[in-house]
Every structure is written in C-alpha cells, then in structure tokens.
Amino acid sequence: MAQWEGKAKGTPLGYKIFIFFIKNLGLNAAYSVLVFVAAYYFVFSYGTTKTSYYFYNKRLKQSAFKSVLSVYKNYFVFGQTLIDRTAISFGLKRKFEFTYDGKEKIQRLLEKREGGVVFSAHVGSFNIARYFFDEFDMTDTGVNLIVTDQENEQIKQYVGAVSTDTTMKFIVIKEDMSHIFEMNDALVNGEVIIFAADRYVEGIQYLEHEFFEKPVKFPSGPYKLAARKKKPILFMYIMKGSGRQYNLYAREPEFSETSIKPSHVLREYVRNTEIMVKKYPLQWFNYYDYWDDLKP
C-alpha cells in the first residue's frame, strides 16, 4: 500500500518566483508563467505525472486523452492556488472573493466553545483556512491548524514573513509526537483543531477504507481522537472556484450509530471527500501513487 513520504509540491525557488511576479507585475502576470511551469512539470516530473494520470484514468474513469489533459490542468490549477495563497498572505485578500456553504455550522461550532475536530484533505486549498476563519469571532475559541514541519517552514520563510496578522494558531507535527499533547490540550481547552487526514506515513497505525473503489490506508490517529474525545466533528474543504473565487464547504457527519467509532468517522470522511473530488476533479493534490496503481 502506498504511503506519503513527507514531500510536498512547491519549492522555495517557486515561492520566490511567485512573490517576484506578484510584487512587480501583478497576479495576471504570475498566472501567465504557469503555462510554462505546468508544461515543465508535465514533461519532466515523470513520477507525479504518471501517478496523476492513473488517478484520472483509473479512479475517475476518464478516457486516456482526457486524463492527459487533466494532468496538465491539474498542475496549472495547483500553481494558481500557490500564487493565490502567497498573494493573500501579502494582504491582497480584497482581490479575492470568499464564499461559504455551511458557514452556520462553523459559527455554531465556535459559539459552543466546547472544542471540535475539523477534517480536511489535500484537495483544494485547506492551507488558506486561516483567512476564512479570520471572518469569524475567535476571541473565546482558539482555532489551530495542524501542519507538517515542511509546511510550517514554508509558511515562515516565504509567506509568514510578509503575511498579514491572523488569529489562527499552528500546531506542527513533530517526530517526537509532542504534537499529540498539544492537540489534546487544545481540545481540553475548548479549542478547534483543523487538519488534513488523508495521507498515510509508513510505520504509523492505520485504518483501511475503500476510496474510489479501492482500499486505502488512512492514519488512524485523527479518527481515534475524534471518536474518543466525543467533540463536534465537521468536514471542511476550501476549493478554488472560477476566477479569483474560493469556496468553503462545511459538512456535518451523518452517523446512524449511537456509539461512534473511528471507522464510522473515517467512513463519513471518505464519503464527503469523494463528493468534493468529483465536484472539483482538477484539485486533487496528492502527487504520489496513492492507490498503488503503478505496482504490477
């Protein structure tokens, strides 16, 4: 079964290039560069191109020709989300439109002040959640975004140094597992934690569930935590719409059981994530052999 190796698309040099174009030439000029950047990755990033092709062809059942087009478009859209995230961090949020589908669910979660677990995925742009949540009153309810160490370093070095203030906090996933205690403390204090729970790393405990017609391993920790703490649960996705629009979707689980187990939470997570990927197929940003489709 495939697992994520801790590497993410988007390099320090890439961020520097985006920042240069945004600062000196504007957003449209930065977007225009993506025509060539996407083509470069399509041709020379053979591994990710191949895994993306198999995702569209085998999992989404697209034709061979459409799958090839989808891979290129996927690179292009991913580049747009990086540019947009960088631009928003520069204080250019006013140039974007933010819409909410399920805003009342998030508001209710914050107003309860009981804490909560918000699941997202590496589809769309969950990393800009901080700018969506700044629209809410978080004076009495802390909100924590769970990020990997690599993501945190990128935020600090190439975004955070010039970003506008935000009330959202960050909990960094560490090798010594100390982030577990930080997450637990946050929930005990009635705070909300947000994290993407779709990537399995070799050596950790996992749960398995069919995802787009083939079993996939998911890290068991988030699902066990949500079931054990009995805190409110939401599934949240931030997807790029047309132009400079971003749409936040918040969904509540539909449990039929009275006693909630980790497998029940995972089942609902998979169901909601599949719906979102089908709605926005070009925003699947897991660039590795997620389903072991490339193995003989």
Image (cartoon, rainbow, N blue to C red):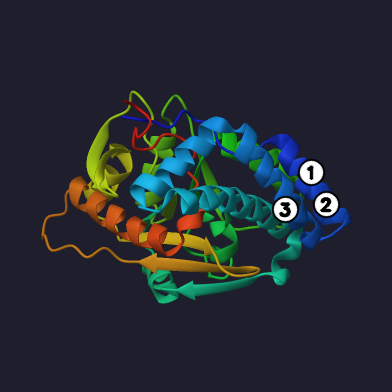
Q: Kindly state the secondary structure of the residue where label 3 is placed.
A: loop
**Would residue 143 be visible to someone looking at this image?**
no
The mark that comes first in sequence, 2 or 3, is 2
**Closer to us: 75 or 198:** 75
Identified at 38% across, 72% down, the residue is: 105
Q: Which residue is mark 2?
A: 21
**Closer to us: 27 or 237:** 27
Identified at 42% across, 56% down, the residue is: 192
**Would residue 235 be visible to someone looking at this image?**
yes
Q: Residues within 10 Å of mark 2 (few under 14, many from 20)?
A: some
Q: Are marks 2 and 1 in contact (CB under 8 Å)?
A: yes
Q: Which residue is mark 3?
A: 163
Above or below, 24 relative to 12: below
Say which amino acid is labelled 2. Answer: Phe
**Residue 112, how many percent across, how many down?**
36, 68
Between the C-alphas of marks 2 and 3, the distance is 16 Å
**Residue 233, how many percent across, how many down?**
31, 59
Above or below, 275 relative to 227: below
Q: Kindly state the secondary structure of the residue where label 1 is placed.
A: helix
Tag shown at residue 17: 1
